[in-house]
Amino acid sequence: MTSARLELSRPVCRVPPSSLREPPAFPAVTFSWLVLLALPIVLVPAHHSWAAQVLLAALMLTVPGVLLLRALRVPGGAVASFPVYVPCASIVVLYGTGLAVNMTGPVIGIAEPLRPWPMLAGFELVCLILLAVSANAPSDVAIPWRDLALTGRTALPLVLPLVAAAGAIRLNTGHSNGVALIALCGCVIMTVALFAYASRVNISLLAVGLYAAGLAMMWSFSLRGASVYGFDISNEYNVLQHVSAAGVWHPSNNPDSAYAAMLSTTILPSELHAITGVSDLMVFKLVYPTLCALFPVAVFYIGRRTLSSRWAFAAGVLIITQSAFGQELPAIARQEIALVFFTALMAAVLETSLPRRRQLPVTILFGLALVVSHYTTTYVTVTLIGLTLILQSLTFWIRRTRVSAGMITALLVSALGAVLWYGPVTHSSSNLVQLAKATQSQGLDLLPNRSQAGGLIAAYLDGNTATPGTPQQYERDVQAQYEKDKPWVHPLPDAGSPAYALRASTTPTPPVKLPAVYNAFSLANVLAQQLIYLLGAVGAMMLAFGRAVPAVGRQLGILTGGTLVFLVAIRFSGTLASFYNAERALLQAMAFLDISIFWCVQVLAERRRLRLSSAVSVAAAALIVVIFATSNGLVGAILGGGTATNLANSGNDYEQFYVTPEELASAAWLGGQVRAGELVYTDVYGQLPLVTVTRISSGLLFDVTPETLSNHAWVYASRTNVVDGQAHASFNNYSVVYVYPTNFLNSNYNLVYTNGSSKVYHR
């Protein structure tokens, strides 16, 4: 039996010897905690200093979590085997504290409770209560901090996020992508090196390396531009600005607003801003990615319950290699927080060595925190656990795997919490209602792109993404749609003139230097991504039905089976894909899928008769490098073909998501001029500045063509529209890039605002 198998026979949450020593005497422990709780009181008056901000943020995301875990009597060994419990428990305390102060403040005469001193008072009071409750906690709750402490060598990978941040800032100021490239190359080299030497280094170094690579990837996107990066987070930032300005959050004042219904976009960032002094903008651009980078680390620690350190590390790395991790997660603040809670919830469910009286309270708190963090992640969690329970009941007669109380508790808490929070509390269930209506009207809409993609296989590989269209097709289709559904839009008489017909435009991309090599990487990336599904399915079967599999491994195998059913459904169904982006769904699913993948690989590597250990390790490293380099722009930066915003100041991604100060200024001006009922037009490129700083996002029209522009309307033109002369539209599941109708606007509309790189027209 190999060493990896021997590790599995040991207790999962064993308490390290260092924690078996008696904890310090009660007065000494109490004094230490009181000192830590006194620090925020001293630092808040000085929180304009960046040093005070860093220290306050660190205290808020650790101290309350440790106190809560002690109060719940969670063994220190369990926390040491999954340190992500600490920040998650801290956010639970911040959620509860902020919500309590927000709701009770106006009742006792505090009109704006989301201000520094009311928030700090609530925070201190709750922490003192937790300290009192945990005063008589047994000695096994002591966390072995010495085993988790960072040394100089262990902390060295944390230089990479700083390099990535410097690279993003240099790109923002118009410099080259040299520093950003160094950071990305550093991430690839470091992860491969740690993977190769995983059996020789300590667990802390592997965890810190994963965290550093993940944070570097996220900061390389989140720190780009003058505002937040992405569409969803622009809406979230708009909500946060209004909550912070008002100093209070009203849960029922925003019916059907899913952005304003989540504590992750209202209470939590407001509380962090109020106490730490970090600006609202930097809470989303800096702090939230810092928390979300724990997601692959959490998967690593869950993986260690069934895998050796090397393959558990590979499971975490595979998440970071996905383009959606660095590019999409920083654009969705709600999901950044929710994914970390999702892994913490599943880690608690899979804590087979914990007594139920200690496991279930943690499961309940993390389940409720997930509900108030992000609705879609909650819906998917309920779906995955539900599918798992169904599969578990079907396979019971084969392996006699019992349904765990933690799994049932997680399902009930998530489902009932969602019903209450999204229903009578916040009235934010409109997205689920829309899904039900879409399913009723169009069914599952299987592979909607199969006709454009050229067959079933091509449609499956492309997924449910929008396919390219022509300006002529778009002009014809959108005009017909407006005549049918928007008869109140009256175009100008000369809108149909041939001189104003839409013309195609393309975004310049660097030429490919070595087409054969570039195409080889692209093909290898496609094959590698499909291999992930195959290995995940095989690994799930091995875990679910294999003989020498620990109980937690069998649970993970069945979870992976349910996850694969969900992934296949969302890959084939256009209706489900419109409800939840397939790439983001895959990221959430990778919490289980990656562990099954590398269980399969680990078993193959341990076959001594085949002598494949070295070959399998090399193949796994190559898989990581190919996906990492191709999906995150390294191949495009070196070989040409264009890259995303993390490495370039050009390209489709840059044009759509990079926001300049001038665009924000023009959008803010327009927001102050528009009156209720007036029409405002912009395209895909121009919507982000408007969404970020105005409240007119719900009434925007996104079809800037001569025959869809009303004879009385405002038109907002972004930097890409004005400087590059391009417009972008998505319509009927296809996308089109065309020449912006500047001539038509200049001839028929008044230019009422311009700052050189963005404009506002009115008629």
Image (spheres, grey):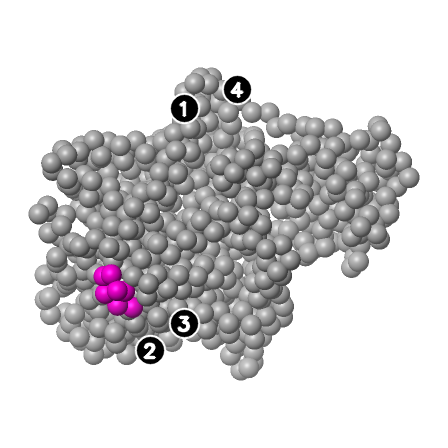
Asked which quadrant contains residue 164, the reply is top left
What residue does disc 2 label? Answer: 129
Q: Nearer the viewer, mark 2 or mark 1?
A: 1
Q: Nearer the viewer, mark 4 or mark 1?
A: 1
Looking at the image, is mark 3 or mark 2 earlier in the sequence?
2
What residue does disc 1 label? Answer: 520
Residue 356 visible in the picture:
yes
What residue does disc 4 label? Answer: 511
The three-letter amino acid code for the residue at tag 1 is Ala
- Label 3, residues with CA under 10 Å away: few <14, some 14-19, many ≥20: many
Q: Nearer the viewer, mark 3 or mark 1?
A: 1
Q: Is residue 734 above or below residue 203?
A: above
25 or 232: nearer the viewer: 232
SS at mark 2 in the image = helix
SS at mark 3 in the image = helix
**Which quadrant of the rendered structure holds the C terminus?**
top right
The three-letter amino acid code for the residue at tag 4 is Pro
Magenta stretch bounds: 396-403
Looking at the image, is mark 4 or mark 3 earlier in the sequence?
3
Measure the C-alpha gap from mark 4 to mark 3: 53 Å
What residue does disc 3 label? Answer: 413
Q: At 72% from the left edge and 37% from the top edge, which residue is drawn?
A: 474
Q: Position of residue 175 (x, y in %)?
A: 50, 28
- Label 4, residues with CA under 10 Å away: few <14, some 14-19, many ≥20: few
